[in-house]
Image: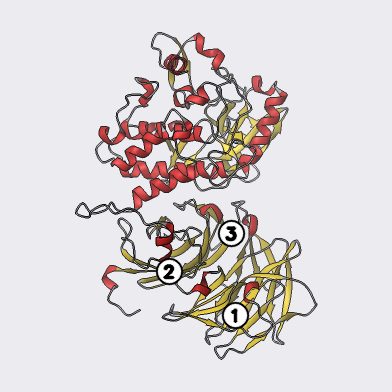
Amino acid sequence: MDERLRQLIGLVFEPTSTTGTDQNGTHVQLLPGLAPHLNPPWYFSDVGLRVGDTFGRYTIVEALGMGGMGQIFRALDNVLERNVALKVIRPDRVASEELLARFFREARLAAKLTHANTLQIYDLGEVGGTPFIAMEHIQGQSLTAYCGRTDVSVERKLHWMLDAARGLAAAHRHGLIHRDVKPGNIMVTDENVVKVVDFGLAKRAATSSRRGGKDKNFQTADVGYALGTPAWMSPEQLEGAEIDARADQFAWGLTTYALIAGKNPRVHDPLLISVSPLDARVRGVGRTIGSLVEKTLSMDPEARYPSMDDLVLVLERALFDPPAPATERHVAPPTARQRATTTQPPPAAAGAKAKWRFERSEDPWTHAPFHAAAFSHDGRRIAAFGQNGMAIHQGKWRELTLPPRLRAANIRCARFAADGSVVVGGTTGLAARILPSGDSERWHPKKNELVSLHGVEITTEGQITFVGQSGAAGVIARVGSTGTLELMESPVALTALVTLASGATLACGPGGAMVMFQGTKLTILEKVTEVDLTAIARLGVGAVAVGADGVAVRIDATFGCRLENVRTTSSLSALCTTEVDAWAGSTLGRIMKRDRAGVWKRMAPDWGVEPRVVAVWAKGVRIRAVCADASRIEGWKKDAAAQST
C-alpha cells in the first residue's frame, strides 16, 4: 500500500511528465499513468460564455477561473443588483444524469450551510439545460498568495487556519465532506474574514454528528476514484478508498504546513515519513501547534483527531490559553469528579484584559438543570428556574417556594422588572409576575389558546411582551391593561426579542427567523442563516443576535442583516450588551466578546467542564454569567479587581 501511494503521489510532482493546469490555474506536471486514478479527468472545457453575455438573470462581468465541475465567473444579478460568483457546469459533466443528480442534491445541502467561515450559496438552477450555482462573491485572496510569506505573522496565519477549521467543522456537522481542501480553496477577504470555498466536489454524508469523526456513514460512493486535487489528498482519498471527514482534516494539515512553511511537505516526502516538524522549521510555532499538525498528517485516519470539532478545541486552547509557567511543577489534570467540585479559578486566558473566576455550586438541590435565569439590573441578584424549583442568588444560592399554580419546570424565559419583580413565561401558556414578597399575578390569553412562550421583553415604560409559538405558527403576546395576554400571530416561531430606541421590536427564532414589528405591523427580515437563533440584544441603533453553531447576526439601523465571524464552534445560548460591546455565553461554558469593530473573541479560559450558560450580564468593568448547573462565572478588569462586587 505504501509503495503504491508513493508512486501515485510521486506522479503529481514528476518533473519529466506531461503538463496540465489545476483548478487554480497552477502549472503542474502529470504523467499519463495518473489519469486513470483521477475523476474528474485532468482537463477543463470552456462553457462558451464571454464577458457581457446574459445567462438567465445574470450578466457575465469577468472570468474568474476553472473548477473541477465547471467555469467560474463574476456576474451581476440583475434582479437583486449584486455581484455573485457564478459557477456554470462544464458541458462534459452535463451528459451524466447521475452526476447531475448528485450535483444538485449536494448543492442544495451546501446551500443550508450558513456559517461565517463558509461561502454562502444564493441560487441554484438551469438555463437552457446548463446547470449553475450563484454564490457569494468574495473580495480577497486565497491562502495560496500567503504561503511562505514572512510579512504576515505566524499567529495571524494560525488564526486563519482556526477559522478555516471552524468552517469545515460546521460543514461536517451538516453532513458535508469538502474533499478538496487546499490553499486555493480558502479565501481571506479584504475584511480579514476567512471563507472555505468551492464545495463543488463536496460529498453528502448519510448522517452528520457533532463529534462523529469515526462515523462510518461519512463515506463517499465514488470508491475506486480519486476526487480532488492529488497533491492535497489524504492517502485514503488518493487510493479511491472509502473516506470520512478525517480526509478533510489531513488536507487541512497540509494546507497549514504549506501556509506557514511555504511548501507542501509531501513534495520531497510523499509518505511524510521524515518531514520536519513545523515547530522545528519555523520560528514562532510552538510544540503544541507542531504536534497538532503532525497528528492531522497521520497516514492512518484512526491516528488523527476524531473530528474537526476536536481539532478546533485543541487549537483554540493552544492559541488562547497561556502555557503553564516554567517554574511550576507538572500536575496531572483533575478527574471529572475533582473538576465537578473545584472552586479554584483557572489562569486567565492569554492576552485577556480581565481576571476570571469560576465557582461551582455544592448545594445538592441545584444540580438539576436551570431552564431559565435572569440578572437584576445591577447584576447583584440572579433568579433561576429549573426542575427543582426557583432559586435566588445574592451572595449564595437559596431556594424559594413558588406561588401556587406556577411550575418552575415550565418556565423558559425570565426578566427582572424595575421594581425588583421577575416576569416569567413558559410552556402551557405560563405568563406571570413574581413579586419580591413572594406573591404573583398571572396573565391569560383572552381566548383559551395553548401557547408556549420562550422570550420576554420589558420596555422602559413597563410594557411586557412575550414571543413564542402556538402550534406550527409563531405568536407575539402583550400584557394588556386588563391583565390579559393580547396575541398577534407570527408566520414563524420566535424565541427572543428586543425593543430598539426607535420603538420597533426585533425578534428572532428557529431556522434563522428574524422579524420586526411595531404595533400590529410585522415584517420578516432577510434570512442570512438557517441555524436556530436563541438570543438578541440591542447594540447601538441596531441589534445583534446569536445562536447555534456559533452564529452571530448583526442588524443595522435599516434592518439589514449580515453574518459575523465568531471564533467558536459551540452554540451561543445567552447574550447581553453594553454601549459598544456584546457578551455571549455558550453551551460549553465559554464567554465570547464582540468589540466595537465587530470582531468576536473568546475571553475566558476553559474550565474543565462544559456548563451551558443560561444568562449573562455586563456593566462597566464586570462580566457575570450563570450556567445551567448553577455554576457562576465572573470576570473583571485587572485594574478594577479591588472594586466592590
Q: Of discs 1 and 3, which sits in the foreground? A: 1
Label 2 crowd (10 A; few <14 / some 14-19 / many >=20): some
Instruction: Mark 1 or mark 2: name the one nearer the start of the chain.
Output: 2
Q: Residue at x 54, y 88 (%)?
A: 436
Name the secondary structure under disc 3.
strand
Can you see residue 595?
no
Q: Are marks 1 and 3 in contact (CB under 8 Å)?
A: no
- Considering every residue shown, the one lying at the far right of the view is 447
- Dot placed on the residue nearer the N-terminal end, 1 or 3: 1
Relative placement, left or right, of 305 versus 281 is right
Q: CA distance from mark 1 to mark 3?
A: 22 Å
Residue linked to disc 1: 423
SS under mark 1: strand
> Farthest bottom residue?
437
Residue 533's tag is 3
**Type of residue at label 3?**
Leu
The x and y percentages for residue 522 are: 69, 66
The mark that comes first in sequence, 2 or 3, is 2
Q: Nearer the viewer, mark 1 or mark 2?
A: 2
Q: Nearer the viewer, residue 274 or 260?
A: 274
Q: Which residue is mark 2?
A: 360
